[in-house]
Image (tube, rainbow, N blue to C red):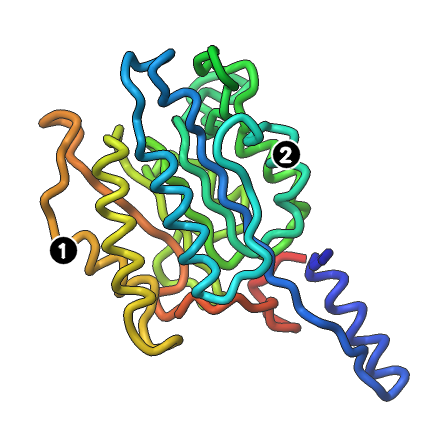
Amino acid sequence: MKRASTWLVSLLIAGSTLGVMPQTTAAYSAHVWSNSNAFAATCLGFTDTYPKQHYDLTVSQYAKLGFSPVGGALGASFTRTAFLGNVFNDFAVYVHSHGDNYWASSGAPNVDSGFLQDPGYLDCNNSKDMVRSSTIKATTLGTIYNLVIMSTCMLGSNASTMPNAFQIQKTKTSTRPEFYIGYVYHAWDSASFRFEKAFWSYMNGGTPGSRTLAQAFAYAMGIGGYEAVSASEPFQANWWGNPNYVGTPTLPSVGCPSCPL
């Protein structure tokens, strides 16, 4: 469902002019993407099973929040083309892959964050098919996103430009129905899975709509026990968005002064 806010406003204006509102069936689509081939034995020397666990967990939990349909891919079908071909219509997005704050095409110190797609069997990741935040920004055309999780290294750091690719404000006081999660430093995917499993167990463990994403985040960080990559890179997740948002998929409010058109 195309849902640029400009289209929504146009529909409402047309409806008020005609005296009736158009009846539509809302589809709050989500896509979950997990890079598995870059975590296979051909690249690591052993088969990492966490990409599939991340994928399966997120598909089920996005559905529990009410996002539907939930699509995406685990493995070789997670391509740059597939991601960019679906992201405009999404209300929720999840990526598990390698990510970093890369230099922008204009050079240092400008940052253009990105993540790597699945490279395919018998291949390993390189930057040739990186999905950059600037490209996502151009593709999303100002549409609104409710929940974005970048289960990658570095895309939750203060330098990350990825939240802006989804029009999510890098603030913890937003009033819009939006929430972004990422990891601050390099992180083992075993640690990120432990965090995300705890996050979802709290978020979807109560009465629907009774718990906020910020509360679930605090719970997951509070359980501890996360393996750090090094002393200089402790496990650290981060979030931006609305501290009171309960994760229910929703269209933007018409007339919202802070909502981009």
Residue 82, numbered label:
2
Label 1's element? helix
Residue at 47% x, 69% y is 248
Q: Position of residue 143 (x, y in %)?
A: 64, 53
x%, y% of residue 195? 24, 47
Label 2 element class: helix
- Location of residue 260 by image quarter: bottom right
How far apart are labels 2 and 1 at the CA level?
36 Å
Which circle, 2 or 1, is nearer the viewer?
2
Residue furthest to the bottom in view is 19
In the depicted structure, whether residue 227 falls above or below residue 251: above
Q: Amino acid at mark 2?
A: Ala
Front residue of 86/51: it is 51
Q: Which mark is residue 209?
A: none
Is residue 36 something one can see in this rendering? yes
The residue to which callout 1 is attached is 222
- Give the residue type that dot 1 points to: Gly
Task: Look at 19% across and 60% down and name the residue there.
Answer: 219
> Which residue is drawn at the image coordinates 21% and 38% (left, top)?
191
x and y, in percent, of residue 251 in the image: 61, 67
Q: Residue at x 54, y 26 (%)?
A: 76
The image shows residue 170 at horizontal and vertical percentages of: 41, 50
Q: Which of the two residues, 7 or 211, is positioned nearer the viewer here?
A: 211
**Mark 1 crowd level (few <14, some 14–19, many ≥20, 10 Å Cα):** few
Specify few, some or many for label 2: CA neighbours under 10 Å numbering under 14, 14-19, or 20 or more. some
Quadrant location, the N terminus: bottom right
